[in-house]
Image (tube, rainbow, N blue to C red):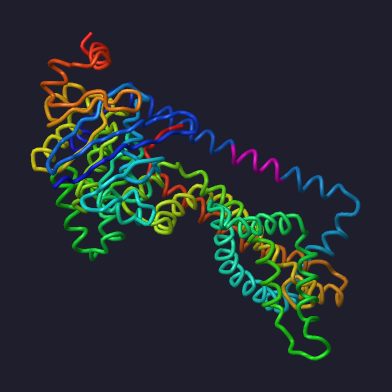
Amino acid sequence: MSVLRLESIYKSYGDTPVLRGIDLEVAAHEVIAVIGASGSGKSTLLRTINLLESIDDGQIWLGEQDISDPRTKPDAVRARIGFVFQHLNLFPHLSVLDNVTLALRHVLRVPAATASERGLALLDRIGLADKAQEFPDRLSGGQQQRAAIVRAIATTPELLLLDEITSALDPELVGEVLELVRELGAEGTTIIMATHEMAFARDVASRVVFLDNGVIAEQGTPAQVFGSPQNARTKEFLARFTA
Amino acid sequence: MTNETARQPSSIELDRRAFRRRQSTRSVLLSIGSTLIFALLVVLTLSVLPGWPRVRDSFFDLGTAAEAWPRVAQGFLLNLRVLLYSVVTVSIFGMALALLRTLRSPVLFPLRALATGYTDLFRGTPLIVVLYIVGFGIPGLQGSQGVIIPTEVLGTIAITLTYSAYVSEVLRAGIESVHPSQRLAARSLGLSHGQSMRIVVIPQAIRKVSPALMNDFVSMQKDVGLISILGAVDAVRGAGIVVSQTYNYTPYVLAGLLFVLLAIPTIRLTDWFTARQRKREQMGSIV
């Protein structure tokens, strides 16, 4: 049973087409790296899955449910999907712990004590337990992104979407964030990540999807896509990274 | 941290600290000196003016002040009551208006337009006119018979009508200044629109606009003095009664002083509160 199934998704901003017929099926425990140039539609794709963007045509299935149906309650869908943005994820007026437990308390209505316990366990896991009462601005960029990731998985979502989560970080902070993603993938979390970290995609992804101009130009295992790309656009794109 | 404290500062740093200490002692002395000179100049100027003794006697007479005190203080309690009620009603009504104006759904256009029209109208109308219309218009609706509506209620209504318009604009500016990604992040966690507003957007908005909100609050504190035109014996009217008996204006000064004393703690409190928030939630910086 697939966790997510996209069927010919179309989306344009005004006259500019962004997604032009995307078909993608994601099985449980897959880690999918979506690569492609800026403007190829990576972020839009992730946002449509989380219903932060409406689509113009096609169907999105989350498990058994067609979430592109307008009768779907977006809040309920989003509660089942974790999402981490490029930056400005955390709420600056709430402590790190309150950030992590927010969805537990207000969406899943978990009692405060239980939520706190789970939040602290998650923070402990990423080595930030001593920062639980600090405010996000006091954390480094890497710490903030790791806190944002554990906030997204606090509710044990069916699917985790990561939208270029290391793009706004200093190079030396990228590693610690990617390490956490690697661990989550190894534990069986189903992940779709838009990324520019080719080495990481090659290492960790079970499948690489190359998005070009709103369509999936090529996909396959990292070995296939990075080792022997078939599509001319893929070769061209990857050449820019190896050069 | 322990290493930091154990380490002896370098001689250069010690020099710098000594210099900074000298500088701050110097600036304190300078400011005391200049304040004294300024005060002396004011006193000298006043004593030279031919009419000063008469003005002093009719505006700053301690005896009259003591005589007026019970009336003015009693009246001031009325102002405080109206202020207290108004703070609550203005907060609720102002927030409701601000939220109405941030709604984007086309179905709610009439409500949004109404809220816009309301803020335009009441920010444009002088409070004193609103006070007259509410203070004499609402009781007038009952015809020749009817109950007497307390001035507290009428004053609160008038002040709420005017100040909600101001406060809603300030709050709206605050809500719109919160980065859209914050709302996006909140929604992506599964929070509803209302929850996102309540838990994420509004707390940040209020932090951003708290100086402006306090400005409106202080302004409201003194505008509750205008309810005297409705005939109620508040601090200003109480002072006026004594003035008409003694032909001495000191009671007005006394009433004014009470309003100033009311405002100062609020102003200091907000300054302290915003400073604390900033310190807690943001990285420190010298600029």
| Residue B29, x across and y down, in percent | 55, 38
Residue B41 in the figure: left or right of residue A82: right
Residue B56 vs residue A221, the one in the foreground: A221
Most common SS among magenta residues: helix
Relative to A34, is B106 above or below? below
Residue B63 visible here: no
Give the quarter of the image for residue A241. top left
| Residue A199, x across and y down, in percent | 16, 21
Q: Quarter of the image containing the C terminus of chain A?
A: top left
Residue B31 in the figure: left or right of residue A57: right
Residue A217 vs residue B201, the one in the foreground: A217
In the rendered picture of this protein, how many numbered marks are placed on residues? 0
Q: Residue furthest top?
A: A243
Residue A222 in the figure: left or right of residue A15: left
| Residue B41, x across and y down, in percent | 75, 42
Q: Residue furthest bottom?
A: B145
Name the residue: 75% across, 55% down. Answer: B124
Relative to B150, is A173 above or below? above
Relative to A117, is B244 above or below? below
Residue B48 visible here: yes
Bounds of the magenta segment: B31-39
Name the residue: 56% across, 53% down. Answer: B106
Give the quarter of the image for residue A140. top left
| Residue B88, x across and y down, in percent | 56, 69
Residue A179 in the figure: left or right of residue A107: left
Magenta-colored stretch includes residue B32: yes
Magenta-colored stretch includes residue B36: yes
Residue B2 vs residue A241, the one in the foreground: A241
Relative to B218, is B45 above or below? above
Name the residue: 79% across, 70% down. Answer: B133
